[in-house]
Amino acid sequence: MKTIDQYNFAGKKALVRVDFNVPLDADYRITDDTRIRAAVPTIQKILADGGAVILMSHLGRPKSGPEEKYSLKHLVSRLSQEFNTNVLFAEDCVGPQAAQLAQELKPGEILLLENLRFHKAEEKGDADFAKELATLGDVYVNDAFGTAHREHASTAVIARYFPKDKVMGYVMQAELDNARRVLGNAERPYTAIMGGAKISDKILIIEKLMDRVDNLLIGGGMSYTFVKADGGEIGSSLVEEDKIDLAKRLIAMAREKGVNLMIPVDSVIADAFSNEANIDTSLSHHIKPLWMGLDIGPTAREMYADVIRNSKTILWNGPMGVFEMSNFSVGTEAVADAVVDATRMGAYSLIGGGDSAAAVNKFGYGDKVSYVSTGGGALLEYMEGKTLPGVAAIERDDY
């Protein structure tokens, strides 16, 4: 497989699958351009070689055809500004206008196609739709790691029509390189921090990590399933009753494998799921009735920070509490602080996309950790050992 650095794009029209699924406010202004900035080096490489760029992406989850709030035309001015050029826009990703604009595209020019998901055929992985997209370019570049776990027309199927001319972009390569670093011979002590609402979302990754990590720190809503499995009283905290036996098994597995599995010893609790609720601190195993744990407590924060600061490899996926509410963001920020400290002292830290990435960026730490993944779900599936269709389509000739 050629890497993007081994490919010369001179005179070529590069059809680039990017992940421009960026948040927009009510006035269609971009509120976080992280994903756009991530794709810039790939686009610049193609232009510098003397190629032309045709960008395709999805945005949001349109239900049935075009919707104004999901139109990629809202990104044109931001892209034009980034590349100091007039970025062209096709009002559909296929059809006569897109074909004509692509055909007339000159080296150094950029064309942005309308939202792929305005067509149901995209998510269905329709071969005819993929084939029509493929006619627009000479070479296919996949730089959308965030959608690599989906076998969609533009992320996997389309690669069939570029048997000799398909490469990964810099984002995709960096994502895989960083994931492999924590999957391979990671420097020890190796600490994984797992948070978020549900244990069911993280079962496979936790099981996979048991053979690799020294410390496994549990936080977020999923921690209360572990607390209950450990015999605790959790009040009205979030719990997955059908996963209690699983949590017991994971606790036993950690003990058997010598992994230091830590459940927060104390919690910040509230009498309602609200930033305005009454707040208290409690031992996690003794939360009073009708109260719920919404963040890790001060003792847990200190214990977790101590483990993190003494680590050489850190994988973090999922917040420690309801970090969107200021009263319950302290635990997540404390963990972020500790990860930054450890990184500064030479540790390698991978932030696993989704809410973890949002939290790190919210606290202004995006450039103070080793790598922030752009693909939450894709990263988890890759680390669980699953084949990512978007990766396999580029790496294998037989896909």
Image (cartoon, rainbow, N blue to C red):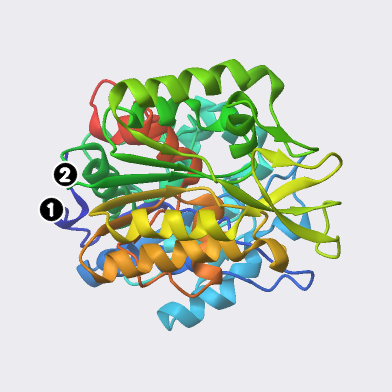
Q: Are marks 1 and 2 in contact (CB under 8 Å)?
A: yes
- Res 245 → quadrant: top right
For residue 223, side relative to residue 45 (left or right): right
Whether residue 182 is visible here, answered yes or no, is: yes
What's under tag 2, amino acid-wise?
Lys
157 is higher (above) or lower (below) than 398: below
For residue 154, side relative to residue 160 (left or right): right
- Across and down, in percent, residue 303 comes to 44, 55
Residue pointed to by mark 2: 2
Label 1 SS: helix
For residue 359, side relative to residue 184 (left or right): right
Residue pointed to by mark 1: 6
Label 2 SS: loop
Q: Crowding at label 1, few (<14), some or many (≥20) Cα neighbours within 10 Å?
A: few
* Residue drawn where x is 24% and y is 27% of the image: 396
Viewer-proximal residue among 399 and 363? 363
Viewer-proximal residue among 365 and 95? 365
What's under tag 1, amino acid-wise?
Gln
Q: Residue furthest left?
A: 6
- Res 1 → quadrant: top left
